Image (cartoon, rainbow, N blue to C red):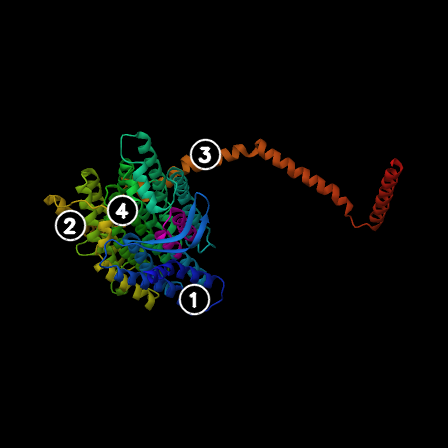
C-alpha cells in the first residue's frame, strides 16, 4: 500500500514538473512534445494501473501526503491526496482524455510560434485539475479550483493579439469568480461551524451537527453552506444563471475547448457536489434547486444549439445542456449516474471537439457549418469520428452516451419527478435533432469548400481512440454504485422505457426530412426572426446582464467621477507636483547657484552652532 501511495503522489506532480521544465527551458518542438505528452500519458498509465489494482474492490481508500501546508492551533492543512472510486474515475478521465488531447495538439499546434507556451499552460491545467479531484481537504481542492480557472483564462486568451480573445478570456474569468467567491465564503462558514476542512470529516460532522430534525437553525445552516458550494459549482460548470461565459470560451485553440468541455474545468462543479453528496443530503431543498437548475439549463443549451451556425458554438451549447443532465441527476439523488454521464460525455465531447478542430484545420479555419458540406468522402476519418460522436451525443442505442443518459432518465422518473422527466425527454429530442442537423449539413450537404490540408497522424490517432471509447466506453464503474446512492428503476412503465429509446430516431428523421427538403440554412420567416434571434443569442442573457449590471455600473462610475475621495487623492497629486516643481529649482544646473547655496548653508549652520554655544 505504501508503494501505491508513492505512485498516487506522482499523479498530480508529473504534469506539474513537466510544466516547470517547459517554462524554464529552451527546447525544440520534439522535446516539448515528449515532455508534455509523456507526462500526462504517464499519469494515464498510472491511473490505468490503479484501476487494475482496485478492479475487484468496490470500497477502497488510498491516501498520500505531499507535506504540511498550514499548521496552526485550530487549523491543520496538508497537501493530502485521497483516492476512492469517485476520484479514481475522475483521474482516469482527466489523464486519459487529457493525454489524447495533448497528442492531438502536437499536430494541431505544430505551426504555432508559441508552441512551448501552449504546452506549458496545458500541462499546468491538467496538474491543477488532478489536485482538485484528489484533494482530501476543501482548501487544497480550492487551490486546484482556482488553478483551472487561471489556466482556462490563459488558454482561452492564448492568441491574445486579437482583442476578442482577450475579452472572451476576461468574461470567463470574471463570471466564474462570482461562483468562486460564493464557494470561498462557503469554506469559511463550514470551518467556523464544523471546525475542519477535511472533506471526509465534514461529511461525518455535518450529519452529527445538522441532523435532519425539526430544528430550523440546523436545517438553515446546512442549506446555506450547500447553497454557497452550489454557487461555485454553477459558475464553474456553466449552469444558470452563470452559463453564458462558456460559448465565448471558444476563442482559444480547439484542443483547449476539448479539454475545458470534456475533461477539466466544467466537470469540476459536478465533482464538487458529488464529493459532498452526504452534506447535500442534509439540504433537500437545495438538492431540488440543483435539479431545477439542471433542467432549465439543459433546455436552454439544447434549444440554443439547434439554431447556431458556428461549429464550435453548437458544441459549446451542447456541453451546457449535457452538464444540465448531470445536475439534474445530482439533484434527484442519482450521483453515480451523474458521474457515469460525466465519464461518457468526456469521451464523445472530446471526440466531437477534436473532430471539429480537424475540420477547421482542413478548411482554411472556417467555422460556419453552412460554408462546409460534401466532406464525407474527402475527410473519411473525420467523418466517421464525427458520426460516432453525434450518435453518442444523441444517445443512440449501444453507444456510450446511450447507457449513461438512459440511466439518468430512469433515475429521474424513479425519484417521482415526472415534470422534470418530461423536460429531460424534450431536451433529449432537441439534442438528437441538432446532432443530426450538424452532421447532415457538414458532411452530406453541397460542397462549399475543399480541404486544403489533411489531419496529421497524431490527430487521427487521437480521433480513432476516442471513437472506440465513445462506442464501447459505456461501462458503469462499480465503485460508484456503492459510494453514492442509486434509485430503484425496476418499476418503469412501457412508455417510460421505450420513449427515451425511440425519441432520438424520431428527431433524426425530422432533421433528415428538413435537410432533404433544403430547409436548413434558409432565411428565417419574418414573424419568427425575433424568437430565432432570442434563442440564437442564448436566450439574451448577455443583453440582460449588460442592461441590469454593466450599463448601470458604468453610469454610476461616470456620475461618481468627481467624488470627494477622488478629490482628496487629486489634492495629494497636485501637492506632490508643486513640491516637485519647488525643489527642482535646486537642481537647475547653474554652478553659481550651487556654490552660493553651499556658502549660505555653511553660514547658517555656523550661526546655529555659535548660537547654541552662547546659550550654554
The residue identified by callout 2 is 501
Q: Earlier in the sequence, mark 2 or mark 1?
A: 1
- Gap between marks 4 and 1, in whole Å? 36 Å
As drawn, which residue projects farthest toward the left? 494
**Principal SS element in the magenta part?**
helix
Q: Residue at x 68, y 37 (%)?
A: 575
Residue 6: x and y in percent read 37, 61
Q: Please name whichever residue, 195 or 149, is drawn nearer the observer in this view of the structure.
A: 195
- Gap between marks 4 and 2, in whole Å? 19 Å
Label 4: element kind = helix
The residue identified by callout 4 is 326
The residue identified by callout 3 is 552
Dot 1, how many residues are within 10 Å of its Cα: few (below 14), some (14-19), or many (20+)?
Answer: many
Q: Nearer the viewer, mark 3 or mark 1?
A: 1
Is residue 580 found inside the magenta-colored segment of the image? no
Dot 3, how many residues are within 10 Å of its Cα: few (below 14), some (14-19), or many (20+)?
Answer: few
Q: Residue at x 78, y 48 (%)?
A: 588
Residue segment shown in magenta: 127-153
Label 2: element kind = helix
Q: Are marks 3 and 1 in contact (CB under 8 Å)?
A: no
Q: Residue at x 37, y 43 (%)?
A: 232
Q: Earlier in the sequence, mark 4 or mark 3?
A: 4
Dot 2, how many residues are within 10 Å of its Cα: few (below 14), some (14-19), or many (20+)?
Answer: some
Q: Earlier in the sequence, mark 2 or mark 3?
A: 2
- Residue 452 is labelled as none
Dot 4, how many residues are within 10 Å of its Cα: few (below 14), some (14-19), or many (20+)?
Answer: many
Amino acid at each position: 500500500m505504501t508503494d501505491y501511495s508513492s505512485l498516487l503522489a506522482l499523479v498530480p506532480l508529473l504534469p506539474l514538473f513537466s510544466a516547470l521544465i517547459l517554462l524554464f527551458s529552451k527546447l525544440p518542438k520534439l522535446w516539448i512534445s515528449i515532455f508534455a505528452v509523456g507526462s500526462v500519458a504517464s499519469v494515464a498509465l498510472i491511473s490505468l494501473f490503479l484501476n487494475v489494482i482496485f478492479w475487484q474492490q468496490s470500497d477502497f481508500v488510498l491516501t498520500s501526503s505531499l507535506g504540511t501546508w498550514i499548521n496552526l492551533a485550530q487549523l491543520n492543512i496538508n497537501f493530502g491526496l485521497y483516492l476512492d472510486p469517485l476520484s479514481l474515475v475522475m483521474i482516469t478521465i482527466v489523464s486519459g482524455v487529457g493525454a489524447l488531447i495533448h497528442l492531438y495538439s502536437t499536430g494541431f499546434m505544430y505551426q504555432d510560434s508559441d508552441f512551448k507556451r501552449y504546452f506549458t499552460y496545458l500541462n499546468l491545467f491538467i496538474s491543477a485539475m488532478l489536485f482538485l479531484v484528489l484533494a482530501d481537504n476543501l482548501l487544497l481542492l480550492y487551490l486546484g479550483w482556482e488553478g483551472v480557472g487561471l489556466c482556462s483564462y490563459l488558454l482561452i486568451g492564448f492568441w491574445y493579439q486579437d482583442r476578442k480573445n482577450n475579452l472572451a478570456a476576461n468574461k470567463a474569468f470574471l463570471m466564474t469568480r462570482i461562483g468562486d467567491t460564493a464557494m470561498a465564503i462557503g469554506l469559511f462558514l463550514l470551518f467556523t461551524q464544523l471546525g475542519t476542512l477535511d472533506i471526509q470529516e465534514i461529511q461525518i460532522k455535518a450529519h452529527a451537527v445538522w441532523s435532519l430534525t425539526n430544528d430550523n437553525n440546523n436545517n438553515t445552516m446546512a442549506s446555506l453552506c450547500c447553497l454557497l458550494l452550489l454557487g461555485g459549482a454553477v459558475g464553474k460548470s456553466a449552469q444558470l444563471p452563470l452559463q453564458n461565459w462558456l460559448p465565448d470560451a471558444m476563442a482559444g485553440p480547439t484542443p483547449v475547448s476539448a479539454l475545458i468541455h470534456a475533461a477539466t474545468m466544467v466537470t469540476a462543479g459536478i465533482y464538487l457536489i458529488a464529493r459532498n453528496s452526504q452534506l447535500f443530503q442534509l439540504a433537500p431543498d437545495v438538492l431540488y434547486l440543483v435539479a431545477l437548475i439542471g433542467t432549465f439549463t439543459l433546455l436552454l443549451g439544447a434549444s440554443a444549439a439547434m439554431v447556431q451556425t458556428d461549429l464550435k458554438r453548437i458544441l459549446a451549447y451542447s456541453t451546457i445542456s449535457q452538464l444540465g443532465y448531470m445536475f439534474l441527476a445530482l439533484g434527484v439523488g442519482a450521483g453515480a449516474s451523474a458521474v457515469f454521464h460525466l465519464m461518457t460525455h468526456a469521451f464523445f465531447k472530446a471526440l466531437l471537439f477534436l473532430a471539429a478542430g480537424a475540420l477547421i484545420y482542413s478548411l482554411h479555419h472556417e467555422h460556419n457549418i453552412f460554408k462546409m458540406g460534401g466532406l464525407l468522402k474527402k475527410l473519411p476519418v473525420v467523418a466517421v469520428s464525427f458520426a460516432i460522436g453525434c450518435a453518442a451525443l444523441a444517445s443512440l442505442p449501444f453507444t456510450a452516451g446511450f447507457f449513461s443518459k438512459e440511466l439518468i432518465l430512469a433515475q429521474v422518473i424513479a425519484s417521482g419527478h415526472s415534470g422534470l422527466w418530461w423536460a429531460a425527454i424534450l431536451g433529449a429530442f432537441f439534442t438528437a435533432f441538432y446532432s443530426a442537423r450538424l452532421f447532415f449539413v457538414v458532411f452530406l450537404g453541397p460542397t462549399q469548400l475543399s480541404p486544403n490540408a489533411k489531419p496529421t497522424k497524431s490527430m487521427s490517432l487521437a480521433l480513432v481512440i476516442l471513437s472506440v471509447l465513445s462506442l464501447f466506453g459505456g461501462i458503469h464503474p462499480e465503485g460508484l454504485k456503492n459510494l453514492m446512492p442509486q434509485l430503484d428503476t425496476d418499476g418503469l412503465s412501457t412508455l417510460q422505457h421505450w420513449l427515451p429509446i425511440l425519441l432520438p430516431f424520431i428527431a433524426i428523421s425530422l432533421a433528415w426530412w428538413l435537410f432533404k427538403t433544403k430547409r436548413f440554412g434558409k432565411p428565417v420567416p419574418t414573424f419568427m426572426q425575433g424568437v430565432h434571434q432570442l434563442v440564437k443569442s442564448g436566450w439574451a442573457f448577455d443583453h440582460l446582464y449588460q442592461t441590469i449590471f454593466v450599463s448601470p455600473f458604468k453610469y454610476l462610475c461616470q456620475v461618481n467621477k468627481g467624488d470627494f475621495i477622488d478629490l482628496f487623492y487629486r489634492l495629494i497629486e497636485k501637492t506632490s507636483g508643486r513640491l516637485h516643481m519647488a525643489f527642482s529649482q535646486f537642481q537647475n544646473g547653474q554652478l553659481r547657484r550651487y556654490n552660493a547655496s553651499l556658502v549660505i548653508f555653511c553660514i547658517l549652520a555656523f550661526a546655529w552652532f555659535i548660537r547654541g554655544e552662547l546659550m550654554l
